[in-house]
Amino acid sequence: MREVHKDIEDVVEQILSTLPPKSLMRFKCVSKRWYALITDPRFVAKHFSISKQNNRCTPCVLLKRLLHEDNNGDQTQKVFSLLKFRNNVDIDIDNDGGDDEHSFVSGVEDIDIPPCLSLKTQGSSLHIVGHCNGIVCLVAALSGEVILWNPAIHDFKLLPLQPYLPDSPEIVGSPLPGWPKDVPISIHRDYMDNLGFGFDPRSNDYKVVNIGFPGVEHPADGYNINLPPKTAIYTLSSNSWREMKTFSLETQSTILLPDRFQVYFKGMCYWLGRELHKEILLFDAMTDEFIRNIIILFDMADEVFHDMLLPDSLYDPNVLCFNMRLLVWNESVALFGMRNGNSFSGSSFGIWVMDDFDGPKSRWTKHISFDLIEKPLAFLKSDEILMADTKDTKGRIFSYNLSTKRLKYLPIESMQDDSATVVYDNYSIVSILGGNELKNTDRYTNAGSSLLEHSSFPSSIIDNEWHSYSVWAILPDDVCLKVRKVIQGLRSEFGGPEIEPHITVVGSIRMTHAEVLNKFRSLQSCVPSGYKAIVNRLVIRSFYYQCVSLLIDSSFQNEHESSKLWRATGFCGSCFGFQSGVRPHLSLLYGNLTEEERTRAQEKVSILDESITRMSFPITKLALYKIDYKDKSLKSWEKIAEYNLRYHN
C-alpha cells in the first residue's frame, strides 16, 4: 500500500513539474503537502530543467517598450512586455508592410510593476541589467537601487543599498556640464553599466556585482592618476552587500575597467571593457590614456576577475569597431562586432565565437558576416537574431535570419535609450524571497541543462594565445643590492612577494611569444644607448603593484639628464604600439594595504635607508619579462630576453 501511495505521489510530482508557474502558484494553496512540494528546492530545480528544455522550442523575449495610450496616440508609457512567439510558424516571410508582422508573435503580455515598488524607487525609470535562471535584475536610473524580479511568479525584491562604493559612478572621459571643475576629465556613468548579475553554482546563490570607479587624482606634478575600481557583491542568501578587493583589475602599469555588462553564462559574468594607463601626463590624458578594448569576466564562484582580448582583426588601427555585443549563441559566447573602414558603405557585422574552450591554442573564429549595421539584442534561435533599428526614430525591432538574410519587423516599439533585451525562460518558479533556492541534485538535473554547470576558467580562454609581457630597466648590481635590502625590510613587516628590483619601462604588452620577441629585437635599434635614472621621490598608491614605489624623474626638458629617460621610455612604448609611455617607477612593495599601513610603510623606508630617495644611477640593460598578473607570488614571472645598452658618462 505504501508503495502504491509513493507511486501516486511520483506521478503527481511529474505532472506538476510540467505545469506553468501561474498554475503552480495557485496549487500551493491546495494542501500543505503540495505547498511543501512546490517550494522544495529539488522540485524547483526539476521544474526549471524541464521548462528550460521546453522553452528552447518556444522562445519568449522580455523587453521594455513604448505603449501608446488608447485615447491619445501621442501619449505613451514605458512598460515591460513579454513577447511570445509561435513555435511552428515560418517567420522568414517577406516583409511587405502588411499584417504579416503579427503572424509569428502569438501574444504580448504587459507586466505591471507594483505601485509600492515605484514609490520606493522614487518613480525613476527601471532598466534591465541582466537575466539568469528566470530572474531578471533591474536598476533604477536615478537612484541606482537594484531590484530582483521573477516575472513568471510576480516576485519583486528591492535590494538594500550598498555602503561601499562612491555615490556617483564615474569613468575617465570628456567633461559634462555641471561636473566639478576640479575633476575636469570625469563623466558620470549610467548605474546599469557597472552592475552584473548571475548565479554562483558552487554556493547555489545569486549574486549582484557592483563596480564603482573613484575617478581621477590630479597631483601637482602634471600627471593624472586613474584610481583603481572598487567592487561590492550582494548575495541573495544573506540579503547583504560586502566589499571585495579588485586586485585582478590591474597590471603593473594599467587598470582594467568593465564598461558595460553583457551577459551571464555558465558561472561567468561578461563585460565589454577598456584598459587604461594608471598614470599619464595631463596633456596626454584626453587622447592617449586609452590602450585597448578588452573583455572582462567575473568568476561568480571564485570571485576573481579575468580579462581576454578581442579577435585580432578588431585591433587593426585602420578599422573602426562599434556596436560590439556579447551574446550566448549555440551554447557558446559569441562576439558581435561592427567593422568599418573608411566609410559606412564598407560596414558589416561579424560574429566571432570561441570554439575550443579548453584547447591549448584556443582562438576566436569568425563564423558569419552580414551587411546590416543595426544593434544586436538577442538570439531567438540559432539562426534568428533580434536587432534594434537604430535609424528608426520609433525604435522598432526586427528579426533577422542569418541563413535566409530576411528580416521581419515586430509589432512593437522599443526604447531607443534602453533596448536591453533577454530571451527569457518564462517557466521558472525560482523565488527571490527565500525558501526555494536552486540546488544541484543528481536526481533532478537533466543531462544537457546548463543551469548548474561550472568549470574553472581555462587560461587558454583568458589569453587567447596572447600573453602579457613587460620591459624592465635593470638596475646596476650595487643599486640592486641596496634596493633589495629595503624590499626585504618592508616584506618582513607588511608581507607581499619578493620583487626583483627593476624600473617598469613598458607594461601590459599583449602579444604572442614570436611577436613580442621580434618587437624587442627591433627595440635595440630604437633605444641603443643607456641613460641615467634619477629618483624623484617616494610615493604610496592604492594599487597593488605600486603600493610603495620610487618615482623616477622623467622630465622632458632638454637641459635635464632625465630627458634621455623620457625619450627612451617613449621610444619603447611606441615600439610596442603605445601612444604614450608609462610613468617610470621602481616598486618597493606589492600589497593590498590600508591607507594607514601604506603610510607606515612609507615611513619605514626612511628608517631602512633614507638615501634611497636621493639615488641616481645608470641604466645599461633592458630585459623582457613574461608576466602573469594573476600570479601575485610572482613565481611564474620569467625573463625571456635582454640586451645591453651603450652608456657613456
Image (cartoon, rainbow, N blue to C red):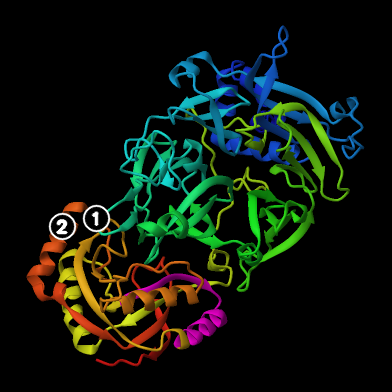
Q: Could you say which disc has been placed on residue 505 in the image?
A: none
Circle 2 or circle 1, nearest the eye: 1
Question: Circle 2 — which element?
Answer: helix
* Residue closest to the eye, 283 or 129: 283
Question: Circle 1 — which element?
Answer: loop
The residue carrying mark 2 is: 599
Identified by mark 1, the residue type is Ala
Report the residue at 29% width, 52% height from top.
218
Q: Is residue 140 above or below residue 602?
A: above
- Closer to the chain start, of discs 2 and 1, is 1
* Residue closest to the eye, 580 or 429: 580
Q: Quadrant of the N terminus?
A: top right
Report the residue at 54% width, 80% height from top.
513
The residue carrying mark 1 is: 220
| Res 546 seen here | yes
Stretch in magenta: 503-524
Is 490 on the left-hand or right-hand side of 122? left
Is 195 on the left-hand or right-hand side of 29? left
